[in-house]
Image (cartoon, helix red, strand yellow):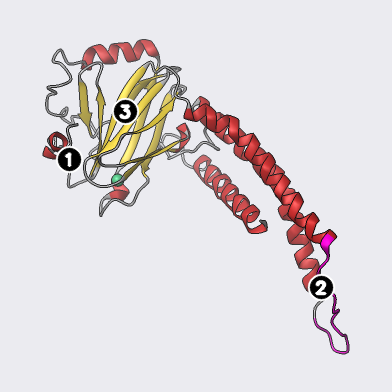
Amino acid sequence: MRSRCRSYAAGAALWLGAAAAARAQAPGSAPVTNAFGDPASSWAHILRHTALTGFWILFPLIAIAEVLLVYVIFKFRRRPGRKPATFHENPGLEIFWTVVPLLAVLVVGLLSHGPLHFYDETPPPDLNVMVVGHRFFWEYRYPDYGIDFANKDLVVPAGRNVDLQITSVDVIHGFYVPSLGIQMDAVPGRITHAWFNAQAGHYEGQCAQLCGPLHGEMWISVDVIPPAQFAAWLQANASPAPAAAPAQPAAPAGAKPASPAAPARPRPAGLAKEGL
Ligand SMILES: [Cu+2]
């Protein structure tokens, strides 16, 4: 039980460290921020609040346990001429150190239930986007507008519910945008879901599953823009052709290539094979 508490604290400390590091980046360099340093969606705010609440509930217990441990190590260490105590088992103490952490974990579990339910229940979406992972770039499809492109920023409206249907055509990738609080695997042959409602801004992420040699360059960029601007973007990019017969992915003019090996890849044959 105590080790579980410790791992929570270690995780929280890592997150906080990452948040501090993200803040330390020079302005304008578009660092990969996270839900602790830069929560940018309704879910990311809830995630941050829940994690920090859990941390502050568990932290005193961890601190007490560690202080007691250090105290016992020094106070009862072996010394010449001193005989060790021979007692063992102390039911009162054992019940105490079992029940208190159990209650703490139960409280944290109950606190997490509402937020997890919130995230699990996708609200009626204002925009559907299909996210397709490829080795080594991301493809985005807007099925309601006949838009399909790769190697460019995902563009979505601010303050609207965006539902992502996530899949892959080759290996398992991970769609991970920390500031939006989203991390979801892209699994071949399956469609996974994530949703968010974000404030305007530019957010960076990265593939979160080790998917091959260029995994480290499989960046994700999300542009969350005001709804009016998004409507104009839709108008400029929407294809008159039905989504069932999409054009080749948009030319990457001005777009960030996903990798040196894949500056402008045509739509892979795997897509059709997978029926996607
Ligand atoms: Cu990947």
Residue at the image point whose x is 72% and y is 51% from the top: 101
Q: For the residue labelled by badge 3, is the local secondary structure a helix, a strand or a loop?
A: strand
Task: Give the side of residue 130 with respect to residue 108, left or right.
Answer: left
Residue at the image point whose x is 75% and y is 58% from the top: 65
In the image, residue 188 above or below residue 255: below
The numbered mark, 1 or 3, whose residue comes first in the sequence reads: 3
In the image, residue 177 above or below residue 97: above
Residue 154 — which label? Answer: 3
Q: For the residue labelled by badge 2, is the local secondary structure a helix, a strand or a loop?
A: loop
Q: Position of residue 62 (x, y in %)?
A: 71, 54
Residue at the image point whose x is 52% and y is 43% from the top: 24
Q: Position of residue 270 (x, y in %)?
A: 14, 40
The numbered mark, 2 or 3, whose residue comes first in the sequence reads: 2
Q: Nearer the viewer, mark 2 or mark 3?
A: 2
**Figure quadrant of residue 3:** bottom right
Q: Amino acid at mark 3?
A: Leu
Q: Amino acid at mark 2?
A: His
Please state, as top left, top right, bottom left or bottom right, where the C terminus lies in the image.
top left
Residue at the image point whose x is 44% and y is 26% from the top: 196
**Figure quadrant of residue 257:** top left
